Image (cartoon, helix red, strand yellow):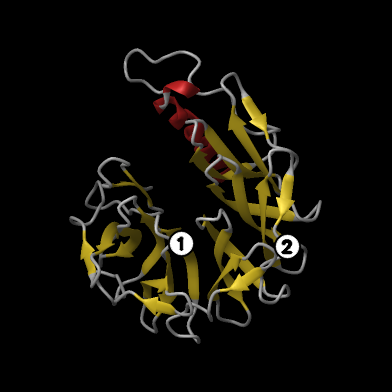
Amino acid sequence: MRLAWLFCKTLILLAVALASLFPLWVMAQPTNNTWVQIGGAIDLDENQEAQDAALKISPDGLPIIAWSEAGQIHVKRWQQDGWEILGTALNHTAGDFAYTPALELDPSGNPYIAWQEFDGQSRNIYVKHWTGEGWESFGESLDLNPANDSTTPTLSLDDQAYPIVAWREQPSSMCVIYAKRWTGDSWQQLGASLNNHEAENACRPSLAITPAGDLYVAWYEWRGISNNIYVKQWLGNHWQMLAGPLDVSLDQGAYNPVLVVNKQAQVMVAWREYDGKRDVIYVKTWNGNDWQQLGSAIATTPTGFAQHPVIAYEPKTGHPVVAWE
């Protein structure tokens, strides 16, 4: 537990250190391509456990970070000379345990946060956004049934800066993936569940929207033999599978897909998969007809296990950049 705590604290400090790549954020310019820490620890109380850090860059080039600390969701942004906290804790109900924030920014740099919160009976999904003066809620919980356990929200914004959220909900022994869009006054469910097979267990959705407004969701799902990676696209009135599964080997376990769409509307997915000896990272891109693998498996040692990938892209070239554990 102590190691896990230290790891979570380290993640937040690393996220802050990452800010040194952008000159506006640093108090002293690095002279030899070194990392420069921006301010101190983000935490409100360094004696409390902090985890689940999510980082975005605002249009003016400044970092905004959301995290969970002692069961509360907080957000801070860098303001040239220090970290400014945005309002109070986002929790829907004071005293309930909130964690795993998903973070997005509107064109003005105002953050939107989706998270899961445990009320003592079940976990529910909530969304708020920063108005410039305070946190405003988007209705009540998104769950189809608040009595169900709902987790791992993933968030994006449409061209009207309305949030779209996908999450995992457990109405029975099996988990299903749902998505909803904010219409301006209420949450609208997007089709039925995304599951490839309704009776199979589906987990870890990852959602992204192209500049043209095309919506995609990736997840992994049990197939009777192993977990496999799937991607669907929203066509306005139903979800359509994009070929798949994406797995390199359908009989080996594949987990935790991360989906990103670059400015050229290219859809890319990274995930962890067992190759018969160890876990490695694969990346594929959608070419309009099928999934094309980018390069070979990603891993640094012949015996090491690679997991927890994250993927972004270079703004100018659109090329993917992958980090992993």
Please tell me which residue is depicted at 76% across the width and 69% down the height of the picture. Answer: 121
Q: Is residue 71 left or right of residue 264?
A: right
- At label 2, which amino acid type do we have? Gly
Q: Is residue 322 visible?
A: yes
Q: Can you give x and y, in whole percent of width and height, for residue 253 in the image?
A: 35, 70
Q: Which of the two discs, 1 and 2, labels the residue nearer the N terminus?
A: 2
Tell me where residue 67 sits by quadrant. Answer: top right
Residue 185 appears in which quarter of the rendering?
Answer: bottom right
Compute the Cα span from label 1 to label 2. 22 Å
Residue 80's place in the image compared with 58, above or below, is above
- Residue 36 visible in rendering: no
Image-quadrant location for residue 225: bottom left
As drawn, the residue found furthest toward the left would be 295
Q: Which residue is mark 1?
A: 206
Q: How far across and down, in percent of the image, does residue 195 sit?
A: 47, 79
Q: Residue at x 33, y 57 (%)?
A: 265
Give the answer, above or below, for where 77 lies relative to 97: above
Please provide percent x and percent y for residue 58: 51, 37
In this rendered view, identify the residue nearer to me: 192 or 218. 192
Q: Secondary structure at mark 2?
A: loop
**Residue located beneath label 2 in the image:** 139
- In this rendering, position of residue 79 left or right of residue 16: right
On the picture, is 85 further left or further right than 55?
right
Give the answer, above or below, for where 71 lies relative to 225.
above
- 16 relative to 255, above or below: above
**Residue at figure coordinates x 59%, y 18% from the top left:** 81
Amino acid at dot 1: Ser
